Image (cartoon, rainbow, N blue to C red):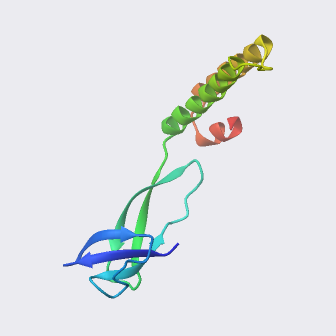
Amino acid sequence: MSMYVQVINGEVKEVWDTVPADGVGNNGWKNAIEVRPNIAPNRQMYTGHSFDLNTDPVQIIWGTRDVTVDERKDGMRANANFKYEQLVNQKNMPESTVTDADIATALATKDSTIAAINAATTHDQLDAIA
């Protein structure tokens, strides 16, 4: 995607993903590109960004950080709960085909999944659950 930054007095004032009406090269508008380092899925995430105004096009450089095991566990528990709650909500809809047995099975699955998540201490163990 094309990006554009307006730089005034050495500071970025605006970032757009559409061509500015003034056009690139006018009123401080410059072409820009995003620089996103590769990240390890489920192990790292993007953080804030900075600008390298000394390059052409201007670089919007994204930072990264490691995801802790506890952060990942929180997300996995939330997903397990959400999946179960979706089924419960489905059962309460008119003409639903979800049965009490389906709910009981889903609850047991959720509880065992959360127990496994809680017992995990490494990303590799969490990978085995996902």
Q: Which image quadrant: the C terminus?
A: top right
Q: Provide residue 103's location: percent of width, then percent of height.
A: 73, 16
User: In which quadrant of the rendered view does residue 52 lie?
Assistant: bottom left
Q: Provide residue 96's location: percent of width, then percent of height.
A: 76, 20
Q: Provide residue 23's location: percent of width, then percent of height.
A: 37, 84
Q: Residue at x 37, y 79 (%)?
A: 21
- 102 lies above or below 11: above
| 35 horizontally vs 86: left or right | left
User: In which quadrant of the rendered view does residue 91 lie?
Assistant: top right
**How many badges with numbers are in the image?**
0
Q: Residue at x 76, y 11 (%)?
A: 100
Q: Residue lying farthest left?
A: 9
| 51 horizontally vs 101: left or right | left
- 72 lies above or below 53: above
Q: Residue lying farthest top?
A: 100
| 55 horizontally vs 8: left or right | right
Q: Provide residue 59's location: percent of width, then percent of height.
A: 40, 76
Q: Residue at x 36, y 82 (%)?
A: 30
Q: Residue lying farthest bottom?
A: 25
Task: Give 47 or 3, whichever is nearer the viewer.
Answer: 3
